[in-house]
Image (cartoon, rainbow, N blue to C red):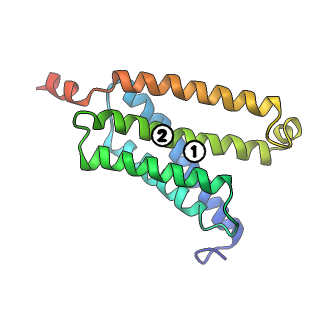
Amino acid sequence: MILGMSGSAFTLLHVVLSLIGIVFGFIALAELIANRSSSTFTAILLGATIATSATGFLFPRAFDPARAVGIISLAALGGALIARYGRHLAGRWRLVYVVTAVLALYLNVFVAVVQAFQKIPPLHARAPQGSEPPFVAVQSIVLVAFVVLGFAAARRFRPAETAALAR
């Protein structure tokens, strides 16, 4: 039992939170690239991703790579929260927000790919150890895609300029 739930119910909750974070993360990322930022999509991305990382620590296991990713994700999310809500994206905090939000989304997708290769039989058959070429290729593609999208978001998201143009 974890938080009064069976292990399978808690795992389902954790996975659903992760998927919500990923879906709304991609929506929020697309908005950053389009020089927009919805408070709702941002709040859902940050909230669901924080909940995903935090619930990951409640699974009964020793320190492992998943927990290390969780620590990095929570640190990035802390930076995103400070930049967005504490510093209101002023000055360099805009870039801090973009980098940390994209990093948190990337880490969530990275873990989803790991889990897919562990849990989906056809993928697992191609990379049972998680270090074979198909796994490395998929993770490399994901990383390159996030670097490209992150650069695009960092270059294009200018909330102060958008607000000035709207006046």
- Residue 22, quarter of the rendered image: top right
Quarter that holds the N terminus: bottom right
103 to the left or right of 135: left
In primary-sequence order, the first of circles 1 and 2 is: 2
Along the line of sight, the residue nearer the viewer: 136 or 29: 136
Q: Tell me which residue sits at (83%, 34%) in the image.
A: 132
- Where's residue 131, x and y in %? 80, 37
Q: Tell me which residue sits at (57%, 42%) in the image.
A: 107
- Can residue 148 be seen by looking at this rendering? yes
Tell me the SS state at disc 2: helix
- Where's residue 102, x and y in %? 47, 36
Tell me the SS state at disc 1: helix
Q: Tell me which residue sits at (84%, 42%) in the image.
A: 124
- Where's residue 53, x and y in %? 54, 56
**What numbered label is drawn on residue 108?**
1
Q: Tell me which residue sits at (69%, 40%) in the image.
A: 113
Quarter that holds the C terminus: top left
Q: Is residue 141 above or below residue 6?
A: above
Look at mark 2 in the image and give the residue it sits on. Answer: 25
Q: CA distance from mark 1 to mark 2?
A: 9 Å
Give the number of the mark in front: 1 or 2. 1
- Residue 99, quarter of the rendered image: top left
- Where's residue 78, x and y in %? 39, 52
Along the line of sight, the residue nearer the viewer: 85 or 96: 96
- Can residue 23 be seen by looking at this rendering? no
- Amino acid tagged 1: Asn
In the rendered image, the residue lying farthest to the right is 125
Label 1 Cα crowd, 10 Å radius (few <14 / some 14-19 / many 20+): many
- Amino acid tagged 2: Gly
Q: Are marks 1 and 2 in contact (CB under 8 Å)?
A: yes
